[in-house]
Image (tube, rainbow, N blue to C red):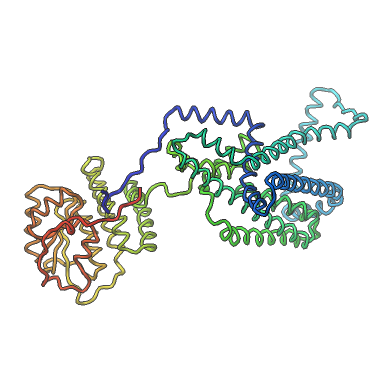
Amino acid sequence: MPSETDIQRPTAPAGSGPLWVIAAIMVLAVLHFGRDVFIPMALALLLSVVLIPVARLLQRAGLPRALAVTLLLFAALGAIIGVVLLVISQVLTLAADLPGWEMNLREKLRALSDGSGVLDRAMGTLRRLSEEVGGGSAAATGAAVPVAPAPAGGGTLDAALNMAAMVVHPAASLAVALLLMAYLLMQREDVRDRFLRLAGMKDLHRTTRAMADATERVGRYLLMQMVMNGIFGVGMGVGLALIGVPNAPLWGIMAFVLRFIPFLGAWIALCLPLVVSFATSADWTGPIMVIALFALVDGVVTHVLEPMMYGRSTGISPLALLISSALWTVLWGPIGLLLAPPITACLAILGRHVPALSFLEILLGNSEVLPAPLRFYQRYLADDAEGAIEIAELHADANGPAATLRDLVLPAVAAMSADQADGVLSAAAVRRISDGLASISATLVADEPLAPEAQALRTLPVAGAADRALAAVAAAAARLQGWRPAVDGETAAMAVLCLARPVSAQRLRRATATAGITAVPAFGFALEDASAAQLGAAIGPAPVLRNLDALVARLPRGSTAATRKPVEATAATMEPPGLALPA
């Protein structure tokens, strides 16, 4: 049974051998070379996850499943066609208006270069270098520069055919994705049952929980992201139209689409209308208003609406999202960048529910990897006292200094004592960590007020650095109860003998003799069974306490310790139940 002084080390995830590396490389290669098949499947799966709640709502309204799925399919297809037609019309309008902006753009660039001349000098240098390279090569060869013949008729037709060839592949992928989405919506129970059978019937409850978690978390995330991106796109489009930026609907649609790209999408959506405003505005008011509009819309969506609407996040750490975005972009191109967040969330959920894939949760998830007591002790092992102090202060602000002493400092003392006994810590490291733990214990209670009539308590380490740190923790806990530390030469009202590990009989006799001289009565404070038994045999009928809760109960606020009689050691005082630390 773990006590409050135990630090439970997380076990290493399974599947960390070289075979997993080879398997991962093979999987990445298959995903890359089979992207024409996997991209439509991923799109269909994510769209079906988003639309399953809508399909269920339509079925509850009385529509047959086939009719509900057909309506969703045509609605998705109509929305895509409408957006594409709107984008095409706006692009054609933009292309027609572009020559009219040339003069204004030249004047803006000239205004930027006036005064400093930096832009003019740079452009002039590049122009002279290009002329020198071109002229030198022509003079060296002595040959005339060939002139490309003007294309014969059919140039427009060739361009149209080339554009059609570029559009056919994504259009076919989208059509396959929509048809597969419709099938998944129609046969979702059958697909789910087949996946459960494929995963195995032994862990049916775990697989079902994983599928429910992925569907709920990813579906909610995608739906809320579509809503937030729609608000962002509408806000940008309407705002740009009011400012007077040309083709505002196009920039609103681009803002909606680009915001699906993690980290950079919103800033790319700003750059496009900003360049257009720079080229079309007579002064600098237009670009400044575009920047102000972006700051307003993005600030409201990101910092006000998203925290209220999202609820639980996808459970992905920002670093994992950044790396996965780069990875999926390399594997699948731009569409991989859009699909990276939901795919990474599914992998993290899979790692959370499948023990063999737990490394995915560690690598991708945003949950706490190390428990707070272990993180606190690790900072001292790494000689990062500032990091340990920061963890302790945050814990104290949230839970109070008493809980910090119990949950962080005391387990760290026990871990240091165990590592010292195992021989993995040098004497210098033990002294450094002990001094740090004693210092943080005193710091946590430094602001606690003491009454003028506060009684004196002497904490006596039996031997060694671990005992000194344990005595500092006991003194800090007593300070929270209104007891002050006894000064040298003073007869204290009570003494506490602190022992982390068993010691020699001679050292223990010397410590108990000191306690008997300086204070009556005394009691013990030990960390483990062996040290508690040794200390209990040495101090006779006085109790030996095993955790801070028992120590605090022994030192009630406002008690008169000198009149208290020694209490026989019982099971409750020897080892009261402690708070088990999280694994």
Q: Can you give x and y, in whole percent of width and height, for residue 420 in the image?
A: 22, 44
Q: Residue furthest right?
A: 153
Is residue 344 visible to the viewer in this orientation of the structure?
yes
**Residue sitting nearer the eye, 131 or 524:** 524
Q: Is residue 503 above or below residue 565?
A: above
Is residue 384 visible to the viewer in this orientation of the structure?
no
How many marks can you see? 0
Q: Residue at x 17, y 59 (%)?
A: 573
Q: Residue furthest bottom?
A: 452
In the displayed structure image, the side of residue 579 where residue 72 appears, left or right: right
**Residue sitting nearer the eye, 366 or 429:** 366
Q: Is residue 200 above or below residue 281?
A: above
Q: Can you give x and y, in whole percent of width and height, for residue 491 in the image?
A: 11, 69
Q: Can you give x and y, in whole percent of width and height, for residue 106 in the image?
A: 81, 51
**Residue sitting nearer the eye, 427 or 545:** 545
In the displayed structure image, the side of residue 431 where residue 194 appears, left or right: right
Residue 10: name its quadrant. top left
Q: Can you give x and y, in whole percent of width and height, for residue 236 in the image?
A: 71, 57
Residue 147: name its quadrant. top right
Q: Is residue 364 above or below residue 521?
A: above
